[in-house]
Amino acid sequence: MKKFIQALTAIIVFSSAGQALAGAGHSHGVSEPISKEQAMQRAASVKQQLVTSKQISSTWTEVAGGNTEQRSTSAGNLWVVEYANPKAEDENTGKLFVFLDEFGNPVGANHSGEL
């Protein structure tokens, strides 16, 4: 009888555990596309993360975003924010391009502008 009660208790606990994690106030539906201004803000955040992780020079910290455009690619519509660093040591790394999907999620960043 003791094992039956333990098994029944375990079944009740585990069957209600999944329901306890689900709650109101959030949605898994479609997000709204971001605006140009939001793309620039999110790209600045990505740029700062690259500086913090030392993937790019700290001179990029003070560089403001320049040309921001939306491109249609095979991966969908992407926001591309371009930065130009006059203090870059190498002309091949003097520009930084940050790519975001239309919802603001980072897709990539490079110095060539090609994705």
Image (cartoon, grey):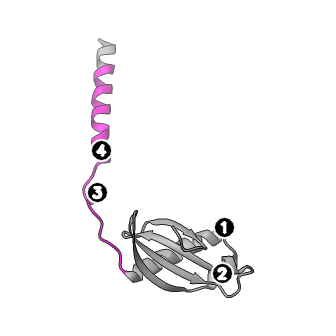
Q: Which is more toward the observer, 76 or 21? A: 76
Separation (CA) of disc 1 from disc 3: 33 Å
Three-letter code, disc 1: Gln
Instruction: Name the residue beneath numbered marker 3.
Output: 28
Q: Amino acid at mark 3?
A: His
Counting residues from the N terminus, which is met first, the one under dot 1 or under dot 2? Answer: 1
Asked whether the residues under the numbered discs 3 and 4 touch, taking CB atoms below 8 Å apart as contact, a structural biologist would say no
Q: Earlier in the sequence, mark 4 or mark 1?
A: 4
Question: What range of the chain is rendered magenta?
Answer: 7-35
Q: Amino acid at mark 2?
A: Gly
Residue 94: which disc?
A: 2
Task: Classify mark 4: residues with Cα within 10 Å, few (<14), some (14-19) or many (20+).
Answer: few
Q: Quadrant of residue 13?
A: top left
Identified at 32% across, 38% down, the residue is 17
Q: Is residue 52 left or right of residue 42?
A: right
Residue of label 4: 20
Q: Nearer the viewer, mark 3 or mark 4?
A: 3
Mark 1 or 3, nearer chain start: 3
Residue 77, given in percent of the width and then of the height, sits at: 37, 70
Could you tell me which residue is drawn at 27 percent across and 42 percent down? 19
Q: Secondary structure at mark 3?
A: loop
When the figure is inspected, residue 10 is found, relative to residue 87, above or below; the finding is above
Above or below, 4 against 32 in this view is above
Labels 2 and 4: the sequence-earlier one? 4
Specify the quadrant that holds the N terminus: top left
| Disc 4 and disc 1 in contact, CB within 8 angstroms | no
- For disc 2, the neighbor class at 10 Å (few under 14, some 14 to 19, many from 20) is some
Residue depicted at 47% across the width and 66% down the height? 106
Q: Which residue is mark 1?
A: 55
Asked if the magenta segment contains residue 42, the reply would be no
Q: Of the residues shown, which amino acid type is indicated by label 4?
A: Ala
